[in-house]
Amino acid sequence: MESAVNAERLARERNKLHKRLLRQTGQAIADFGMIGEGDRVMVCLSGGKDSYSMLDLLLTLRERSPVKFEIIAVNLDQKQPGFPEHVLPDYLRSIGVPFHIENQDTYSIVTRVIPAGKTMCSLCSRLRRGILYRVASELGATRIALGHHRDDILATFFLNLFYGGKLKSMPPKLVSDDGRHVVIRPLAYVHEEDLVAYSQWREFPIIPCNLCGSQEHLKRREVAEMLRQWDKRHPGRTEHIFSALGSVAPSHLLDRALFDFQSLKPSGTPDPEGDIGFDVDPVFESHAAPAPQAAPVTFLERTRPAAPADAEQAG
Ligand code: SF4
């Protein structure tokens, strides 16, 4: 009896998780115009939980969305020792997704060029990026989808802040540095812990990510730990920070390229919404009644043509 109750609860939780992941992914796609009619999306698969989940969610969204787009999965086999090269092709065949495996021995290049004990990640990712751009062109892909999630975006923001002196993060959509590709991050709104739970439930055949022997970037690990601690001790803090990334006030920062402070003049007209001229403690501001917000619109809703009943109501 107890096990039946537990199984029911687990099924409910999984159903909620799946819905949440689809909603957040659809929302990010809609908010940033990531995918449009006729796009050919190259989904980069590393064999980790994030990229497996991204592929899985995009496949479901494609089924449910009236926007027609193609998906092709791509894995770059970097010839790291022990890489189980059959795992991804077997999986992709089993779910019927067209794919391409690009074999490029970047591992030998990186280990030859970088002295032992130094981190190899920056050269490795530069090489990988160049190869993926070339493959995207060869495959006629109009979008390159990467599996970075909300926590990656937050960690990158703090790494740039602490060590780069820049207020910038990881964009959900960008034009590649060669100017030829649009790169998208459909998991931009998704929490990492949800991806952990989802990949365990779906039993994706995960390939370990430490085959290259490189240490995970120490600073990134420290920042991720700082965010975890904040989440434990100050619930809601990272949510606020993440919302702040989408609510920037250039006139209240110091970047003269973003805001023209030189030509700022009094308008002579009172503006009840205008700046009050003195700093307000953001803690007090956060207790003010929030402005009414429109209900979020999902990718599916936004792209779905209005049903006759909706159209009538609208008219
Ligand atoms: S962890 Fe290994 S595979 Fe990943 S970027 Fe660094 S060197 Fe490359």
Image (spheres, rainbow, N blue to C red):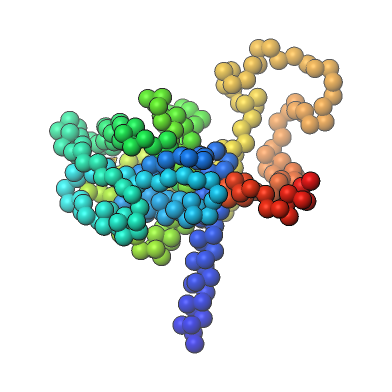
Q: Position of residue 160 (x, y in %)?
A: 45, 32
Q: Is residue 304 visible?
A: yes
What's the residue at 21%, 51% (across, down)?
Answer: 85
Q: Quick one: 279 or 313, which is closer to the camera?
A: 313
What's the residue at 75%, 46% (across, down)?
Answer: 292
Q: Is residue 166 left or right of residue 209?
A: right
Q: Is residue 283 left or right of residue 171?
A: right
Q: Is residue 111 left or right of residue 131?
A: left
Image vertical order of residue 229 relative to residue 255, above or below: below
Q: Position of residue 288 (x, y in %)?
A: 75, 44
Ligand 1 quadrant?
top left
Residue extending farthest to the front is: 308
Q: Position of residue 20 (x, y in %)?
A: 54, 57
What's the residue at 79%, 31% (across, down)?
Answer: 273
Q: Is residue 214 visible?
A: no
What's the residue at 47%, 32% (across, down)?
Answer: 174
Image vertical order of residue 217 relative to residue 115, above or below: below
Please give the count of numbered marks on the rendered protein.
0
Residue extending farthest to the top is: 263
Q: Position of residue 37 (x, y in %)?
A: 51, 40
Image vertical order of residue 82 relative to residue 279, above or below: below
Residue extending farthest to the bottom is: 1
